[in-house]
Amino acid sequence: MLSEIDRYAVRISFRLVVPFLVSIIPVLARAQFLENASFEGTAGMSKTPPGWYACKEWSTPDTHGTATNIYGINRAPIHGTTFAGLVTRGVLGNPNDAMTEAIGTPLQKPLQQGQCYKLTVALANAHDMVHNDGWGGIYYYDQPAVLNIYGGDGQCSMAYQLAKSEAIDHNEWKYYSFEFTATSNLTSLVFEADYPGESKTMGNIVLDDIHLETRSIELGEDISVCAGEPVTLMLRDVTDEQDIEWSNGVAGRSTVISQQGIYSVKVKQEHCVLSDSVTINYIPALSPPGNEVISICEGEVSEIGYRIDGASYHWNTGDKSEMIQVTKAGTYAQTVDNGCDVISKTFDVGVDNTCCTVSAPNVFTPNGDNKNDFFEISHGDRVTNTSLQIVNRWGSMVYETSDLDDYWDGNSHGVEISSGVYYWTVVLSCTINGEDVQKSFKGTVTLQRQHQ
């Protein structure tokens, strides 16, 4: 994502016996910082390319191109069709003495405080630059110049000097790279031609093809490894002169980690300190879980399974999800693989068909012998609300209750009723799959009075 350079040299599977190794290299990430990084535009004297503006009051930069011969400059750009030129005006006794040119541009993406950047630009000195003022004056702007690079928070702001080149005295294009850390959030850049020394000379510098990139160390995504497996973090493509320090106190290109936590590295360079951190998590060893015996009601759906973060699953039913729903009796086996250990768990599921039913005797004998003296209706354990009505053969109510544990003793309103066949109706509610279900049951019971 950050560049064409791979951040990781090695990715090793959990179950290999060799240590887990992460190899890190410095990363350059190109973003669209500049609107017109190659100074493309229409060539002309005192004319800045689109997206750029003149930043000195007395003189405006020029846009040059192939065979345009502006101020005698006749060269091809290193990239695109045009390039920019800046001059230093060191003419003793002239009102413009010690004046320099500068060109600025807003940034499409601000530079962030504390972030390290690398700016690369093609530079040259146009040895053939000459100016005929039309009044008989001929001025040669052929002396070397240096390039100052500034950052700021507005048009032509030169609040922070970010870099400075050596004296550019070569006629051919050469790329120069500058690294710097933004000490503030910056929204604009300014490039200024400057004198290479105390002498105020008449010189020039031409610019083309700017690349501005973030520079960073990328430790990558968080790492999860099996318990007891060491992790080696290693920097490569880092020169010996650079100062490398890991957060665990180790200096050098690599460090071996044996405990989980957050680890960081700092790479100190001349103008930047590159840093990043990574979290290393150790996956605990899995202990085989106990098997489970589960009872569900007939018609009920139950969700079963054993969850482990980041694991994969396999059931003897063919399912590969963490949890499965079951409605039938049977033995369900689950295999859990977290990349380090593989464990198994079984669920023995039974179906109870009495959860929402009632059962009642067909005869009871209320004769006071403490044997079968009551008409007792039993019910399943999911029952919530009930009602019982008992009528005689003519349909007259003889007993009624809303509590099935309130057993009928064979009396009606405190008076013994005669032996015979009676008709009962039970209406109940029970909970199945989280919902109340209402059911109705009917039957007959024979009341026999056999007094001793």
Image (spheres, rainbow, N blue to C red):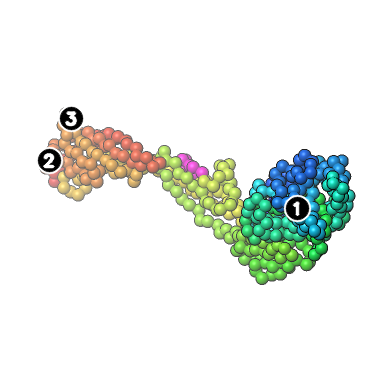
Report the amino acid beneath label 3.
Gly
Q: Which of 223 and 13 is in front in this view?
A: 223
Side of 388 where 50 appears, left or right: right
The residue positioned 58% from the left and 50% from the top of the image is: 335
Q: Magenta residues, as a range?
A: 324-330
Q: Which of 300 and 170 is in front in this view?
A: 170
Q: Earlier in the sequence, mark 3 or mark 1?
A: 1
Q: Nearer the viewer, residue 82 or 237?
A: 82
Q: Are marks 3 and 1 in contact (CB under 8 Å)?
A: no
Q: What element carries label 3?
A: loop
Can see residue 60? yes
Furthest residue in direction left, as rendered = 415
The residue positioned 57% from the left and 58% from the top of the image is: 286
Where is mark 2, residue-wise? 413
Q: Is mark 2 on a helix, strand or loop?
A: loop
Side of 438 where 273 appears, left or right: right
Which mark is nearer the camera, 3 or 1? 1
The residue positioned 71% from the left and 59% from the top of the image is: 162
Residue 326 within the segment the image draws in magenta: yes
Report the amino acid beneath label 2.
His
Residue 445 in the image: state x and y as whole percent: 23, 36
Side of 395 where 171 appears, left or right: right
Report the amino acid beneath label 1.
Glu
Residue 226 in the image: state x and y as whole percent: 63, 59
Where is mark 1, residue-wise? 101
Where is mark 3, residue-wise? 395
Q: Is mark 1 on a helix, strand or loop?
A: loop
Q: How crowded is mark 1: few (under 14 residues within 10 Å), some or many (20 or more)?
A: many
